[in-house]
Image (spheres, grey):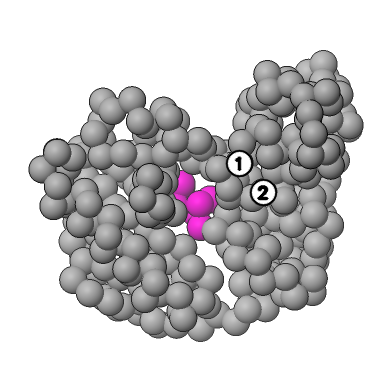
């Protein structure tokens, strides 16, 4: 698609199938497992982190558990340390009495170094703009099965929790698109970014290649949200491409990645709707 090539396609995915893919995760040994069995791999991974790795790095397992649980509850959000601390300790007043920002940051850094979580940082068109560092990162898990296991959910309960399902699906998309972006030569430290501005416009994923080409992608669970996502993508394209002050080239393509969509098709010129299961090659 970065080379201007697109092929319409059709794929059938039920909500139950999508939930099974999320719960199974991307663990190599889980490929041929039932998702209910595969979810135990994520549970075991979390157990090892909580009971072994945290203590080995001189951290408190109790605070580590609270931090991971809060990150799972705030999946895919640009959550402040203050919000995380209130969530961790259930206190609206003086959360610093339990843990400081510096200490919390050290736990999050540890989980990044253990490849438990990944951060998606903010994107602005100008390569040298300091705003790239001013936008708070969003935090996802390395695999969508991990927050499901941490929240003690399974296929049946996730099917009933539409909000968490949407966030877990976004985590799945971030995982897959990170792999594709790295294969295309994106920045190894930040293969994906997201867009957010002071006017409230937000786009879930930006892929920017070393040669300056970029693409914008919105993630929506169902096809009914595609028109809303297309409108956001058009706003971003207008802000970036039609404003001479941004000094940015137009996007190579824009897309809405869906979980329960059926057809990969072009919605408008340069903007596509693509079911996640069409991303195979």
- Residue at image position (82%, 16%) is 58
Q: Nearer the viewer, residue 9 or 79?
A: 79
Q: Main secondary structure of the magenta part?
A: helix
With 186 as the anchor, is 1 left or right in this view?
Answer: left
- Residue at image position (31%, 61%) is 233
Mark identifier at residue 74? 2
What residue is shown with label 1?
A: 79
Q: Is residue 175 magenta?
A: yes
Residue at the far front in the pictured view? 93
**Magenta residues (range):** 173-181
- Residue 195 in view in this figure: no
Q: Nearer the viewer, residue 51 or 70?
A: 70
Instruction: Identify whether 112 is placed above or below 150.
Output: above
> Alpha-carbon neighbours of circle 2 within 10 Å: few (<14), some, or many (≥20)?
many
Quadrant in which residue 2 is drawn: bottom left
Check disc 1 and report its element: helix, strand or loop.
loop
With 167 as the anchor, is 33 left or right in this view?
Answer: right
> Alpha-carbon neighbours of circle 1 within 10 Å: few (<14), some, or many (≥20)?
some
Give how far across and how far down residue 239 sits, in percent. 22, 52
With 115 as the anchor, is 181 left or right in this view?
Answer: left
Instruction: Identify whether 108 is placed above or below 1.
Output: above
Give how far across and how far down residue 34 sits, in percent. 75, 68
Check disc 2 and report its element: helix, strand or loop.
loop
Instruction: Identify whether 234 is placed above or below 88.
Output: below
Quadrant in which residue 135 is drawn: top left
Give how far across and how far down residue 49 sits, in percent. 80, 34
Give how far across and how far down residue 52 sits, in percent. 86, 28
Q: Are marks 2 and 1 in contact (CB under 8 Å)?
A: yes
Q: Reading the chain from its start, which is encountered first: label 2 or label 1?
A: 2
Query: For the C terminus, which image quadrant?
Result: bottom left
């Amino acid at each position: 698609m970065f080379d201007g090539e697109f092929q319409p396609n059709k794929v059938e995915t039920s909500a139950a199938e999508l939930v099974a893919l999320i719960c199974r995760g991307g663990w190599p040994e889980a490929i041929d497992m039932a998702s209910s069995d595969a979810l135990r791999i994520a549970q075991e991974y979390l157990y090892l982190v909580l009971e072994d790795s945290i203590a080995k790095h001189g951290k408190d397992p109790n605070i580590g558990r609270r931090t991971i649980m809060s990150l799972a509850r705030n999946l895919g959000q640009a959550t402040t340390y203050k919000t995380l601390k209130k969530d961790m300790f259930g206190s609206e007043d003086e959360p610093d009495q339990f843990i400081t920002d510096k200490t919390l940051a050290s736990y999050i850094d540890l989980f990044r170094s253990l490849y438990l979580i990944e951060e998606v940082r903010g994107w602005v068109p100008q390569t040298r703009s300091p705003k790239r560092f001013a936008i708070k990162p969003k935090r996802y898990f390395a695999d969508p099965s991990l927050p499901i296991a941490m929240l003690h959910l399974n296929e049946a309960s996730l099917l009933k929790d539409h909000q968490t399902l949407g966030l877990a699906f976004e985590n799945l998309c971030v995982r897959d698109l990170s792999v594709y972006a790295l294969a295309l030569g994106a920045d190894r430290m930040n293969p994906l970014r997201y867009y957010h501005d002071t006017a409230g416009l937000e786009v879930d994923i930006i892929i920017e290649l070393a040669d300056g080409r970029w693409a914008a992608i919105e993630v929506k669970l169902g096809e009914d949200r595609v028109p809303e996502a297309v409108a956001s993508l058009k706003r971003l394209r207008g802000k970036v491409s039609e404003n001479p002050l941004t000094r940015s080239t137009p996007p190579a393509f824009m897309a809405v990645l869906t979980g329960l969509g059926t057809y990969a098709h072009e919605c408008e010129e340069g903007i596509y709707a693509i079911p996640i299961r069409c991303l195979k090659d």
